[in-house]
Image (spheres, rainbow, N blue to C red):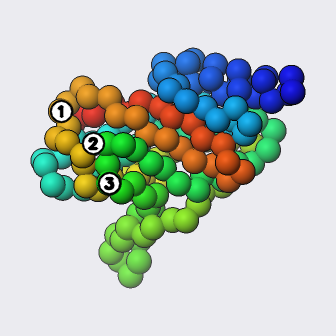
Amino acid sequence: MRSKFMRVITALASVALAGLPAIRATPAEAPTIRVEDAWIRWLPAGVPAGGYATLTNTGEKSLRLIAVSSPAFGEVSIHRSVEHQGMMEMRPVAQIAIVAHSSLNFAATGYHLMLVQPSKPLALGDHVPMTLHFAGGGSLTVQFEVRK
């Protein structure tokens, strides 16, 4: 029981240190993830937006990010931009492994979140809750800031 409690405290502390408040961490399987620079690119209404952040696995085991959800969007999916025959393409990704003691950067030219069907118009400076779901049932909700 104490080990599970310490994992929850570690996950929450990691997020707090990153300056991004945790809304919820699933206690039974709290991931050991630190989230930094979480933001959403503001675009005109009706255009799919992109979500970006840096995820750092501070734990001793690899983690698999399997989904992301948000009440602010009808659909959130993980994508990766790749070059194919001289053209950049965005391809959906089912999951991403984050090796222990490593970081994964979400950026426009690599992995990113595709945010579709906003529930309301977003304004610069808004903060949007996004829940990261990990294999094994753990999840972590952080605030993503809307930026230009």
Q: Which mark is residue 41?
A: 2
Q: Residues within 10 Å of mark 2 (few under 14, many from 20)?
A: some
Residue beneath the point at 45% across and 67% down? 92
Nearest the eye: 132 or 106:
132
Q: How many marks?
A: 3
* Left or right of 61, for residue 76: left
Coordinates of residue 60 in the picture (x, y in percent): 81, 38
Q: Counting residues from the N terminus, which is met first, the one under dot 3 or under dot 1? A: 3
Q: Earlier in the sequence, mark 1 or mark 2?
A: 2
Q: Quadrant of residue 90?
A: bottom left
Mark 1 belongs to which amino acid?
Answer: Ala
Disc nearest the viewer among 3 and 1: 3
Q: Nearer the viewer, residue 133 or 37?
A: 133
Residue 126, x across and y down, in percent: 26, 28
Q: Is residue 138 above or below residue 77?
A: above
Whether 86 is drawn above or below 28: the answer is below
Is 68 situated above or below 2? Answer: below
User: Does residue 58 appear left or right of residue 79 in this picture?
Assistant: right
Q: Secondary structure at mark 2?
A: strand
